[in-house]
Amino acid sequence: MAPVTAYADAPSAEAVIKTYADIAQAGYEDSLSTAQALEAAVDTLVKAPTEAHLSAAKEAWIAARKPYQQTEAFRFGNALVDDWEGRVNAWPLDEGLIDYVDEDSAANNEENDLALANVIANKSLTIGGQPVDAGTISPEFLAETLQEAEGVEANVATGYHAIEFLLWGQDLNGTEAGAGARPYTDYVQGEGCTGGNCDRRADYLQAASALLVADLKEMVGHWDEDGAARKALTDDAEAGITTILTGMGSLSYGELAGERTKLGLMLHDPEEEHDCFSDMTHLSHYYDAVGIRNVYTGQYTRVDGSVVEGASLSGLVAAKDADVDAQLTKDLDASVAAAAAIKAKAESGMAYDQMIALGNDEGAALVTGLVDALVAQTRTIERAVTVLGAEVEIEGSDSLDNPDAVFQ
């Protein structure tokens, strides 16, 4: 990689990395504080199950997603983040591992022996041919025994989406209107309990919420001044710039444009939407797009309205090629605008899973608009990589690179 500090009027690589790490730390701190608020709302629901308390827990979950999704731009390039991320945001999940489901629905995955294990209803399981005591549902049990049991990625037992399922339940509406509709009575103890095993369901929800908080505390620590994630970047500043570009490009292209957006549209499959129980995928996509722009511009608006900002990758690129910087800034704004259009449409009554339905031309146009904007900005990210003399491998997706493979 060319010596980035040699560019006229450029910020130093060290200064850019400091801003990047400061934004990461702030984003994970916001994710932690909102997860703590979610945990408190869950505790209130469990202690006094009512429709109002269930609604409050759902709102707390939605609020917690907004800062977290903006941190996804720190994935891919940062190995430490990627190794950890599956604990908090893995998807899609075979929800029948956790609780009751409609066995005629897509939840019945014949390729997963535990797809209908329903740990909430069963105090003993067989995992990998061995009996497992599931009598106590604790954070440790979820993390160490159930998460990715038998090495199956769809056995997601922890994180935001496990909690989402426990709050909303299955969305059995397909690509029609409506999200999951779990009743608050699924948490009523004793007489009035619906769904059975309300005590264990409450245990699971509280354990998953506590584990999410613990996992986020760990990641906040990794971005402290002496944290492992920050140190990995500052030990080699030029490699750190490559890490930043890798995260931007891979989230933009293979992950968000491909796996989370184009794939679901191609298959017209609501099981491929990121937040499939709550129908809040429009928010996840929007804040992912915002997070990519945050990284490039070196600016993040915290949940309290304060702003973390400093030397930016934009400044580094502009010092070398102002035209590339201007184009990438324009492209990032365009992708955020395309995601905002999806968000606005969802908030006016057309949920994301309805947008990807077969025959919904208006919805398809909105979703395609986001895919196209993300692909365009990735091409400009690649130009920025060239400008900086870096070597970056951007993750791809069959949905974009080999569409025929999707249907094989």
Image (cartoon, rainbow, N blue to C red):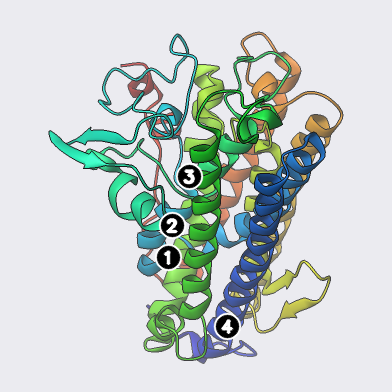
Instruction: Please tell me the numbered disc located at residue 255.
Output: 3
Asked if marks 3 and 4 touch (Cβ < 8 Å), the reply is no
Disc 3 on helix, strand or loop?
A: helix
Label 3 to label 4: alpha-carbon separation: 24 Å
Tell me where residue 185 appears, x and y as whole percent: 68, 29
Disc 4 on helix, strand or loop?
A: helix
Asked if marks 4 and 2 touch (Cβ < 8 Å), the reply is no
Q: Which is nearer the N-term, disc 3 or disc 1?
A: 1
Q: Which is nearer the N-term, disc 1 or disc 4?
A: 4
Asked if marks 1 and 2 touch (Cβ < 8 Å), the reply is yes
* 159 w.r.t. 93: above or below: below
Residue drawn at point x = 44 percent, y = 45 percent? 90
Residue named by callout 2: 85
Instruction: Please tell me the numbered disc located at residue 16.
Output: 4
Q: Amino acid at mark 4?
A: Val
Q: Amino acid at mark 3?
A: Glu
Tell me where residue 163 appears, x and y as whole percent: 56, 44
Disc 2 on helix, strand or loop?
A: helix
**Label 3 vs label 2, nearer the camera:** 2
* 372 w.r.t. 296: above or below: above
Label 4 to label 2: alpha-carbon separation: 24 Å
